[in-house]
Image (tube, coloured by chain):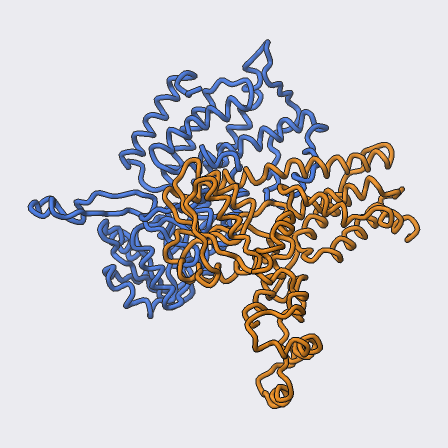
Chain colours: A orange, B blue
């Protein structure tokens, strides 16, 4: 089995292909995943259907392992592999079938680029004239919808800063350039602006089976505030973002890592506090213990308001000031989404630090 | 493309219905639906077309006229859906090889979408349907029409029996010694309550439903059927809600998000019920499902009734000084409704979108 299967993944680096495809700003992770799987298929030497599916599964696994936020990517992989598995075998040769599958994948990716325009058209009915819209971070589909609505309707937009990556500023720049009145608000001011807003419009990283939405950190609090204020909360999602995942809590996402939420233990007396604390549930304290070794190192600097180099190293996206000073151009080339869900957890970190 | 250029008779039938709808001479959405089906049946039977698009466009243009008169095109949408379905089975019966949809990823994504499997294949593949036959342009119409008429008849039958099918399960919803609150006069609710009265002994409180006071009529109808009935003013709905076991409402239209338009006062009753955690059931035929959203209507459906029932002209000196508004419908949001009892079974508001996908074609949402 491993002879033919692992061979293609050895000489073909699916992650490199994935990153190269993502450089096109129009292509979102699920589509990039589909396209990189088609490339894997071109390079694969699989001679039977079983081998091919095996190779695709391996490639998908590889891709997932080496990408910081595999959620939306996974949606694309699953869609494509399910499609390949169920594709009717009508070609004479296996080579013909493979070419046909590759063609299907590429055709879909090309076709899917028009989905945002379709969504923008459909969203138009939900945007009434003279409305004030609150959006979060940067989303290509939301941008399309807003710019499209701007052609026929007067809209003004509040956008959250969306720390730690500050992508709200990108939204602000693009909307202002298009002539849409736009103001950046603090993430902590969502409840403050909510009364002024007609509805909330966000994009999505993935739509899960429970009907829930996975999106950049801060979307959840925005949805909760919108609900409390009785404002409509609309999410735009392309159909390839539907994902077979049923998260029951924030921590069920594959991007969760207990270290992010671990408590730094204070020197000496913290241990005593741990022992005597009656309220700590077993789950919570085990998380704390897991997180102990790294947190010990950073605890001396905990009193300072700035982050230590170690902290920055652990959460490379968090240091907002350095992000803007030096790393912005580099990060901008990447798609906005890859680790947005992780940020949800990282953000807690910044508040604590 | 207008129907009038095809046949003046259709034109007249459509025109008559349009004016009846405008003058509210057709009372009740079931009546309106029945009339619409009858008119469409005439249109189809008289229409001349040589391919399916011509027919669809023809029905659409009739639909557009009717929708302008009264903004509900459900029946037209449903008939278009049936026509396409019949057409597809007829065509596929002839050329079965080309029937399979193209297998592509985008279709694959859509496969998850609910679609009723073509219910009964009435048309057998025996006839040969040829579109755009240059020798005999009517042959297509001749071949397809009997099937279409049958499909339209089915819709008509469904509409005619809708009250019975809705109230089929009435006794599962109403239990003995319960106190039911209802508002307005809805024929569906009336049939439902009467059906439950056959096997249950219960009490109905009817809110009188100003300013139309259609609750009076409802109370009369129910008490004459031997149901113990109380008539209360609208202002006491909240106060009596603590005694009520269940609220049963009628609907004017059910929207894609699971909300609905219903007679004024329904929102009041539903909100009061929410405060007391009293279940709210809505009785409605499936023909009231509408693939539309409540997009920023401050007043339900923007439909206003005669202000004179609120402030009569006998109050002459007040009339200039006061703006009188008498909205006819309330918009009741999906969070206030617990269940829709339809002729197609009972559904929570969250699955209404699914029913709508099954009942209508996506292309027809805008007529």
View extreme (right): residue: A3
Q: Does any portion of residue B110 appear in the rendered image?
A: no
Query: Which residue appears farthest toward the left when viewing the image?
Result: B317
The answer to which of A137 and B263 lies nearer the viewer is A137
Q: Residue at x 43, y 42 (%)?
A: A180
Q: Work out whether residue B328 or residue B203 is closer to the camera in this orientation and state it.
A: B328
Q: Of B255 and B33, which appears nearest the observer? A: B255
State which quarter of the image contains the C terminus of chain B: top left
A195 relative to B187, above or below: below
Q: Decide if residue B204 is on the left or right side of residue A292.
A: left
Q: Is residue A129 left or right of residue B89?
A: left
- Give above or below for B64 relative to A73: above
> Relative to B12, is A225 on the left or the right?
right
Q: Determine the image quadrant of residue A327.
A: bottom right
Where's residue B119, x and y in %? 59, 39
Image coordinates of residue B226 in percent, x first then y, are 31, 59
User: Do we see residue B332 in this rendering?
Assistant: yes
Q: Which quadrant, please, contains the N terminus of chain B?
A: top left
Image vertical order of residue B187 relative to residue B237, above or below: above
Quadrant in which residue B265 is drawn: bottom left
């Amino acid at each position: 089995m491993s002879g033919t299967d692992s061979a293609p993944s050895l000489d073909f680096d699916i992650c490199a292909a994935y990153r190269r495809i993502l450089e096109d700003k129009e292509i979102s992770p699920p589509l990039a995943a589909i396209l990189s799987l088609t490339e894997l298929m071109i390079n694969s030497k699989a001679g039977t259907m079983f081998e091919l599916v095996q190779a695709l599964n391996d490639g998908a696994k590889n891709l997932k392992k080496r990408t910081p936020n595999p959620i939306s990517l996974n949606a694309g992989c699953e869609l494509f592999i399910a499609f390949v598995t169920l594709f009717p075998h009508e070609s004479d040769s296996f080579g013909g079938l493979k070419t046909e599958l590759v063609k299907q994948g590429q055709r879909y990716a090309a076709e899917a680029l028009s989905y945002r325009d379709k969504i923008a058209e459909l969203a138009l009915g939900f945007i009434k004239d003279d409305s004030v819209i609150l959006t979060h971070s940067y989303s290509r589909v939301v941008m399309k919808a807003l710019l499209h609505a701007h052609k026929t309707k007067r809209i003004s937009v509040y956008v959250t800063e969306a720390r730690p990556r500050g992508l709200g500023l990108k939204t602000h720049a693009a909307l202002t350039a298009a002539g849409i009145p736009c103001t950046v608000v603090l993430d902590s001011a969502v409840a403050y602006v909510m009364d002024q807003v007609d509805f909330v419009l966000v994009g999505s990283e993935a739509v899960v089976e429970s009907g829930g939405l996975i999106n950049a950190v801060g979307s959840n609090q925005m949805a909760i505030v919108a609900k409390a204020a009785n404002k409509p909360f609309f999410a735009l999602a392309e159909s390839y973002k539907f994902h077979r995942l049923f998260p029951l809590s924030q921590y069920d996402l594959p991007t969760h890592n207990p270290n992010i939420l671990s408590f730094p233990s204070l020197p000496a007396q913290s241990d005593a506090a741990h022992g005597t604390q009656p309220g700590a549930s077993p789950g919570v304290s085990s998380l704390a213990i897991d997180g102990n070794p790294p947190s010990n190192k950073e605890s001396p600097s905990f009193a300072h308001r700035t982050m230590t180099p170690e902290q920055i190293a652990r959460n490379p996206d968090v240091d907002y000031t350095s992000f803007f000073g030096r790393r912005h151009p580099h990060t901008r080339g990447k798609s906005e989404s890859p680790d947005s869900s992780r940020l949800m957890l990282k953000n807690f970190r910044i508040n604590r630090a | 493309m207008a129907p009038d250029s095809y046949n003046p008779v259709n034109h007249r039938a459509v025109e008559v219905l349009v004016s009846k709808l405008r003058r509210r001479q057709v009372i009740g959405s079931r009546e309106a639906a029945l009339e619409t089906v009858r008119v469409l049946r005439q249109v189809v039977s008289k229409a001349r077309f040589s391919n399916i698009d011509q027919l669809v466009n023809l029905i659409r243009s009739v639909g557009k006229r009717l929708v302008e008169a009264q903004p509900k095109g459900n029946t037209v949408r449903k008939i278009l859906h049936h026509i396409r379905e019949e057409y597809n089975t007829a065509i596929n019966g002839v050329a079965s090889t080309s029937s399979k949809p193209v297998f592509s990823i985008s279709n694959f994504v859509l496969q998850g979408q609910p679609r009723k499997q073509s219910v009964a294949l009435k048309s057998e593949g025996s006839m040969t349907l040829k579109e755009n036959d240059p020798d005999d342009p009517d042959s297509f119409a001749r071949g397809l029409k009997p099937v279409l008429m049958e499909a339209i008849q089915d819709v008509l039958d469904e509409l005619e029996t809708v009250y019975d099918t809705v109230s089929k399960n009435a006794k599962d919803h109403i239990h003995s010694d319960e106190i039911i609150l209802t508002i307005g006069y809805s024929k569906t609710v009336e049939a439902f309550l009467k059906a439950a009265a056959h096997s249950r002994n219960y009490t109905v409180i009817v809110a009188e439903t100003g300013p139309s006071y259609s609750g009076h009529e409802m109370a009369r109808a129910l008490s004459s059927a031997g149901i113990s009935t109380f008539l209360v003013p609208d202002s006491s709905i909240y106060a009596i809600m603590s005694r009520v076991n269940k609220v049963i409402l009628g609907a004017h239209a059910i929207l894609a998000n699971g909300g609905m338009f219903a007679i004024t006062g329904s929102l009041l009753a539903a909100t009061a019920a929410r405060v007391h955690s009293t279940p709210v059931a809505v009785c409605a035929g499936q023909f009231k499902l509408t693939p539309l959203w409540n997009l920023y209507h401050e007043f339900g459906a923007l439909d206003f009734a005669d202000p004179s029932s609120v402030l009569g002209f006998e109050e002459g000196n007040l009339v200039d000084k006061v703006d009188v508004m008498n909205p006819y419908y309330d918009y009741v949001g999906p969070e206030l409704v617990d269940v829709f009892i339809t002729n197609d079974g009972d559904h929570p508001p969250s699955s209404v979108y699914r029913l709508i996908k099954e009942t209508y074609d996506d292309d027809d949402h805008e007529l």
